[in-house]
Amino acid sequence: MLKRVALTLVWLVIGLFDTVAMFLVGALIIGSQVPVRIAIGGMVVDGAWDQGYVSTEGTWTIEGAQQAFPLQFTVIRCFKQYGHCTSSQAEITHGGTLDLFVEQFEITKWDKTTLAFVNNSPVCMDYVYTIDRSTRRTFGTRKPKKDAPEHCKQMLDQRDLKLTLVNGFTVWQQLHADASARIMPFVWCTIALWWAIMFYGIVRMWRS
């Protein structure tokens, strides 16, 4: 009797340790899919707007479409005197590689409430960005070039898309939640199967 009780306790302890281990493995897999956190961002600094300097930062999101590389963060600094905005974007790309892109965009409008700048350098798309002083928001549109090569139409979505520079931490939270939703059901199924095997073994031991 005492031997069976002792063996039952051993099985239960092993089951608890294995359950914790499975949760840890699940957490590691989720972490590998979202390997870094994104800074807060989503802010416009407009204290020197009338003096000709504005900065904004955050993570780009696309309305109604999925980002190819959602783990990214952008800082944009605009100088009215020089007529351009400088964009520095760090992003995690293929194979977990960290890339940095620095570009200059021409300013097309700068008045009391609106700052607009464009990026026409991509082969397939034109981008128009706007910083709204009243709402302190940064957003943009992506439009396909009318004279773009044929491969652009085959490879890229030809809709006009809306972009918004948002709080990067919110994006990270959503990515982490999505990864958890994909991984955790498998973890729970594995745990349930393991405990079913454990209880089956315990019941057989007590019946023998």
Image (cartoon, helix red, strand yellow):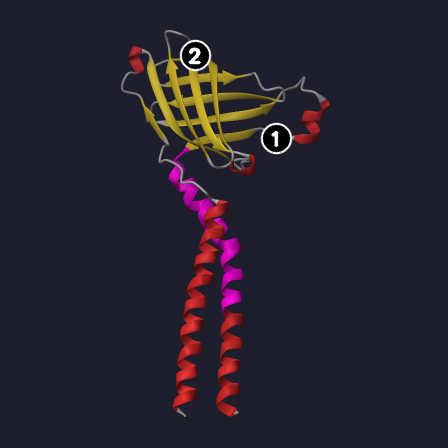
- For residue 159, the mark is 1
Q: Position of residue 51 (x, y in %)?
A: 29, 11
Q: Is residue 15 left or right of residue 41?
A: right
- For residue 53, the mark is none
Up/down of 40 relative to 8, above or below: above
Residue that mark 2 sits on? 84
Badge 1: residue crowd in 10 Å (few <14, some 14–19, many ≥20):
few
Badge 2: residue crowd in 10 Å (few <14, some 14–19, many ≥20):
some
Up/down of 33 relative to 46, above or below: below
Q: Amino acid at mark 1?
A: Arg
SS assignment for the magenta stretch, majority: helix
For marks 1 and 2, give the one nearer the viewer.
2
Task: Identify the residue at horizontal 53%, vertical 76% (top origin).
Answer: 197
**Mark 2: secondary structure:** strand
Q: Position of residue 101 (x, y in %)?
A: 49, 23
Q: Nearer the viewer, residue 182 or 159?
A: 182
| Mark closer to the chain start, 1 or 2 | 2
Task: Identify the residue at horizontal 40%, vertical 7% (top origin).
Answer: 82
Q: Amino acid at mark 2?
A: His
Q: Position of residue 106 (x, y in %)?
A: 47, 12
